[in-house]
Amino acid sequence: MSPLAALLSPAHLLAANGLVLPHVNYTAIMPELILLGGMLLLLGISAVSPRHLPTQVYATATAGIGIASLIASLVLWHDVQKGGPFSAVARAVDIDGFATLVLVLCSCVVILGAFFAAGFLEREQVQGVEYYALALISASGAMLMGSANDLILVFLGLEILSIPLYVMAGLDQRRAASGEAAMKYFLLGAFSSAVFVYGIALTYGATGSTNLASIGSFLAQNVVVSNGVLLGGLALLLVGFGFKVAAVPFHMWTPDVYAGSPTPAVGFMAAVAKIGAFGALLRVLFSTFPTLRTSWQPILWALAILTLLLGALVAVVQRDVKRMLAYSSINHAGFILLGVQAGTSRGAEASLYYLFVYSVLVLGTFGVVAVVGGRGDEGHGIERYRGLAHRRPLLAGSMAVLLLAQAGAPFTTGFFSKLYVIEASIAAHSYALATVAMLSAAIATFFYLRLVFAMFGERAGRQASVAVPVAPAGAGAPGGAAGQFPPVGTLPAGPAVASAAGVLTLERAAGLVDPGRAEAAAVADDDAGPVVADADLQVSPWVWVGLALCVGTTVVLGIWPSPLVDFARHATLLF
Amino acid sequence: MGSLDSYLPILFLFVLAFGFTAFSLAASKLLAPQRPTAAKEAPYECGIVPSHEPPQRFPVRFYLVSMIFVIFDIEVIFLFPWAVVYGQLGRFGLVEIIVFAAAVFFSFVYLVSNGALDWGPLKRVQRVVRPIGGRTSQSTVRRIGSSSDEAA
């Protein structure tokens, strides 16, 4: 047969190979199926419904889908505890304690994310199902990454996770920064995906398999004499993962993307991308490349130190709260890397626990930031938080708990998460790394506390509320104070206030000035004080529910940590 | 070198494609008479005399339609190999492809419901998803020469 003819007759090739159909165990991928099926259902309902459905309907449905997948994940968890771990779908999916923990975690993130998104989209009067559909797809990708036992499936999960996140970053069509964030995230993400695929190709070339377990047993039984290709593959895989978890030096996209994206999307993105990427990274390093530990541990050591220090140091000088939290998330990635670098099951357990804690904290924190940002999602300067505790005590209190937990204060989950990763690191004799981690935690405390002090310490808000009864009575007072800084921030609309900033605030409160211009003016006179109209700080009941869940989890499990710790320990026992 | 033999057809096609392109370009350069006129220099628009410069705004709908095309293109890419081995895949293959087609179909229904296929002047208010904050062309586009009537 001539070569050209062979090209044109694929049937000829098939006859030689034959096909082996995989047995698909649908319970093993049930949580993913529930999320994707629910997403299709939501899309279909939104398409055929004659009128716009309110965003609360979609949020309720999304939370319901999340609860269904949570139940399916817990059923899998039960199966694994009883019958041991198992592989499914031609050994491409591995269901063990580790995978089920990732499934449970992703389901929780979907549920919490729906609450915060509902509050935000309600305020911004966005209709449509897009946000929820994208969140569901993205979470299913993270689940796939956590339970994948094949490099191809890890890559598929990575893409299913990332592509919706690119779109979510650009959902706010009104702000150019949002489009810029989406573009940056997309371009850099696509580039890192390409690097990741190249890593898969090199690994496959060196070991002859893409199955994680097969590669592991191949490397355990054979000594690769010239292992340049294998190490190259491992290095490229690490670059791909490093990008997704925002480890320095692959972190460049993080501040811009976090600052530009719609705020609740940032919280969701930060949580779900880290869960998926760290889940896959842990599995790849621990079950596939344990024989190369001496090669990857130094790389992760350097990555962790850079990530810890740069995240903490650069966050200190940020004045935009979203950018500050972006660097703080880089710092957290460094802490999780600490557990990965340890290379022990204790390290994996600590990393998983940290992931759980971090996801809840970051969702809640960005939930509050979305509220304080005000209508238009633009007010993220630290001056917006000045005196917040006096105007919105409950909101500021929740934010303070979440921030202190991120800083690692005792009686919160954040304390135990930091304790466990540092313990694991010390147990693995990485003393220098553990010292750097503690140092960076100390630096990080500074910027968390600065925000807390801004909310509780400065009395601008209290002065304003005191000034309210004064203003109508002594009409001369505001005029006399026009040159100084009148406490106009929270005054109700009244004719007496004469300063430019005051007029602007009042106009804005009355909806006379378009928010963008008012915001620009507020930035222009920088330290003129809190230009926050109280009407802007409406907290939707959805956000309250989400915050209650986040803060409750943080405090209750911080005082009584054993359930979650046991959960993480059981997850890695069978690993 | 037996393993490399199987790549021979690809190499052959590559040479063929490259050779045909080079030949066509060279032949047109050498053989065609070159007497340019204004009409010949003008951009070709299906034979209609161009009325304005080509670089200008055109509806974003164009991108939507090309995206729909890409979606169905991808579906066809998956359908081809499926059709080739349909006999061997049996019922399993049928169920899987139905699931896949359903996913694509739902996306298509969603696109249609958002007015992705409605062309021409809008007859009624579509189910177009309102961007955050309700942006319109009046609020964002400042027409040239009318800077005085800035959006209030």
Image (cartoon, rainbow, N blue to C red):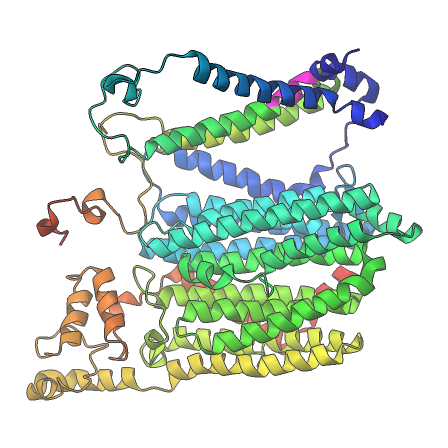
- Residue A187 image offset from top left, x and y in percent: 50, 49
Residue A434 shows in this picture = yes
Based on the displayed image, in which of its 4 quarters is residue A485 positioned?
A: bottom left
Q: Nearer the viewer, residue A103 or A232?
A: A232
Q: Quadrant of the N terminus of chain B?
A: top right
Q: Is residue A332 left or right of residue B110?
A: right
- Residue A185 image offset from top left, x and y in percent: 49, 53
Residue at 15 percent of width and 51 percent of height: B151
**In magenta segment, residue A28:** no
Q: Relative to B18, is A55 above or below?
A: below
Q: Relative to A225, is A322 above or below?
A: below
Q: Nearer the viewer, residue A567 or A332?
A: A332
Is the magenta region chiefly helix, strand or loop?
A: helix
Q: Nearer the viewer, residue A558 or B108?
A: B108
Residue at 38 percent of width and 87 percent of height: A457
Look at the image and give the residue range highlighted in magenta. Answer: B79-84
Q: Nearer the viewer, residue A281 or A251?
A: A251
Q: Quadrant of the C terminus of chain B?
A: bottom left
Residue at 82 percent of width and 59 percent of height: A292
- Residue A38 image offset from top left, x and y in percent: 53, 40
Q: Relative to B122, is A548 above or below?
A: below
Residue at 52 percent of width and 45 percent of height: A163
Residue A349 shows in this picture = no
Q: Is residue A500 left or right of residue A144?
A: left
Q: How many labels, in total?
A: 0
Based on the displayed image, in which of its 4 quarters is residue A242 positioned?
A: bottom right
- Residue B106 image offset from top left, x and y in percent: 48, 30
Q: Is residue A277 left or right of residue A180?
A: right
Q: Relative to A18, is A26 above or below?
A: below
